[in-house]
Image: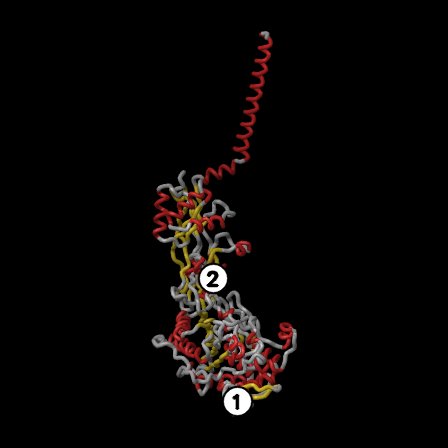
Amino acid sequence: MSVAEDRRRMTFRLHALQVGATLVFIVLGMSFWFLQVVEHQHYEELAENNHQRTLALRAPRGVLFDRFGKVLVENRHSFTISIVREHSTDPSRTVRLLSQVAGLDQAQVEQIVARHRAEPAYRPIVIVEDASLAQVAAVRARRLESELPDVVVQEVPTRRYPSDAMAAHLFGYVGEANDTQVAGGASQGAIIGQQGLEKAYNDMLMGQDGAKVVAVNSLGREIRTLEEVPPVEGRRLQLTVDADLQRAAEDGFRHAGFNGAALIMDPRNGEVLTYASLPSYDPNDFAVGIDRTKWGALNSDKLRPLQNRVLQGRYSPGSTFKIVVATAALEEGVVDSNFRVTCTGGANFFGRYYKCHKKGGHGSVDMRHALEKSCNVYFYTLGNMLGVDRIYKWAEKLGMVGKTGIDMPNEQESIIPNSEWKQKRFGERWYPGDTISVAIGQGFLSLTPASLAMMITTVANGGTRVTPHVIKAVDDGSGWKPVPPPAVAERVAFRPDTLAALHDGLWMVVNAAGTGGRGRVEGRDVAGKTGTAQVISNEGRARARNSGRDLRDHGWFVFFAPKDNPEIAGVIFGEHNEHGFLGAPIAKHVIETYFAKKEGRPLPVLPTKGGSPAPKDQEDPDVPGVLNDGDVIAAAAPELRPLN
């Protein structure tokens, strides 16, 4: 090979090397330009985040007070332990080590992380709510040793409810926003109201979260705070509820030994004084994230502690509904208060014999004494004269149809039947015999305690259908501002004879020879009506005797006091307490507490001995004694009358 040939080849190789080197530098230059110019902001943020960390500061929720300024629900300090994936080099190692250090189930921690995997990496994933001091100390010690740089311990405000679960169904509870709530606009990971007042007034109570920017070193350890925007506490709310009356009602139930519900109001304006539903639950369990075991136990409990009986329980009203029938008969001009019926222990209607609770009968009774004695025959007669549609009309005027309008979530509508309702519901016409059962509070009727509280409040105040409400004032940081009460739903101008007959008859129930004597309070002129309602027909009870279900009757007591200028009115519902008059002592205790407090006297104390049961041979004048399979369809209809 010639020297010239070697030179040509060498020259070609050098030229190729120069071109290749030039191309490499061009590519490197373009890459540097792309990274430094096009991607400048992105990498600047990464660099910034390498020594800064932004932590959310949870806003305390607004405090709840009773009508006299007593704190009901407040906040306490607790600690959360979270993982920040953005600063994690080995997430699996972090999960494993955190589980060991904090004494956690590793599988559950992995599930929590997996559930939040789609969220931004910079958002902390809360692993432990309400961490113990031992857990906090252990995690912080490992952070000092730089073993858990991607784990954050934060002090946060946490809801604190009364320790004895007082008014749990009124307050409700808070919890982390679920997927549906996030889709509706809630922030991921936000703690929001899930039930009760916490849910109804969540926007007022939440406040505004703050933020803290801290400097961290290469190991993720916080060095100093660079910037802090403090959170803004939610608005404080003053409730219409009286804590002492609330406790009196709940103590009364426990003393009596049965569960149920109570809704007690000021009949002059609809302010709710007492709101109780038992059995209950502890909202504090939800405030820190309820565990699966407790949640499962609450949902499987046969006593249904999660059910808000005031608004969601529907039951036959029994003899308390006779007040509606009496009102309808008087206002429609079908009878006057002196109208008399002779009760011989039963009466025939449409070829069938309907019994009264008193075998020998009540003799000749007028309206007042029929209410006092709770005479079934008298109200069978009125119901037959009225017809179901006029009864429905007055049930609606007294606030029992539809919802009450109370400022609480998840209220169920009561079922008040009429001829149109039955045609739509069952595809059949209304039979006159159906009215006989409705006239004494049985049949297709299925009412919430709230609707009965509305009825007795309207009767008490003379025909004004006030709207029940639980908020009295709001403090947005500039002082308390009264909240205007809801508009009056309707005003019914009762005839003087109607009001006099109703108030006199209901006063006699408690203070004469009636069924509510256990609710009598000396000098207070308490008026009321008891009611006992079967939950299943007589034949159905016999067939279900070994079913393990509680088939005992429910009991009611509706009341107001004083008779002429009522200041307090409401309902006591006793679930499976068998007799309506057993609820009267609870109302009595609340009434005595109300007036003792008003007059500055010591509050009454219940006796140490439990409530006395009804003597076995004592006849309950409110037991209808007519529920046979062929008589009252709805009494055994599971969709209308669930067996509890």
Image location (x, y in percent) of residue 337:
54, 88
Name the secondary structure under disc 1.
Answer: loop
Query: Tag 1: Cα neighbours inside 10 Å, few (<14), some, or many (≥20)?
Result: some
Name the secondary structure under disc 2.
Answer: helix
Q: Does residue 10 appear in the picture of this structure?
A: yes
Point 58% across, 80% down: residue? 630
Q: Nearer the viewer, residue 634 or 494?
A: 634
Instruction: Indicate whether 621 appears above or below 218.
Output: below
Quadrant in which the N terminus appears: top right
Image location (x, y in percent) of residue 258:
43, 74
Q: Nearer the viewer, residue 65 or 393?
A: 393
Instruction: Indicate whether 121 appears above or below 451.
Output: above
Q: Which mark is residue 198?
A: 2
Check the image and tell me how it is coloured: secondary structure
Query: Tag 2: Cα neighbours inside 10 Å, few (<14), some, or many (≥20)?
Result: many
Q: Amino acid at mark 2?
A: Glu
Q: Nearer the viewer, residue 187 or 254?
A: 254
Find out whether the residues at labels 2 and 1 contact each other: C-beta distance under 8 Å: no
Instruction: Indicate whether 291 appears above or below 278.
Output: above
Q: Amino acid at mark 1?
A: Gly
Image location (x, y in percent) of residue 629:
57, 79
Q: Nearer the viewer, residue 582 or 541?
A: 541
Image location (x, y in percent) of residue 56:
45, 49
Among the two numbered marks 2 and 1 on one chain, the one whose residue lies closer to the N terminus = 2
Residue carrying label 1 = 345
Q: Does residue 226 appear in the picture of this structure?
A: no
- In the displayed structure image, the side of residue 102 where residue 505 appears, left or right: right
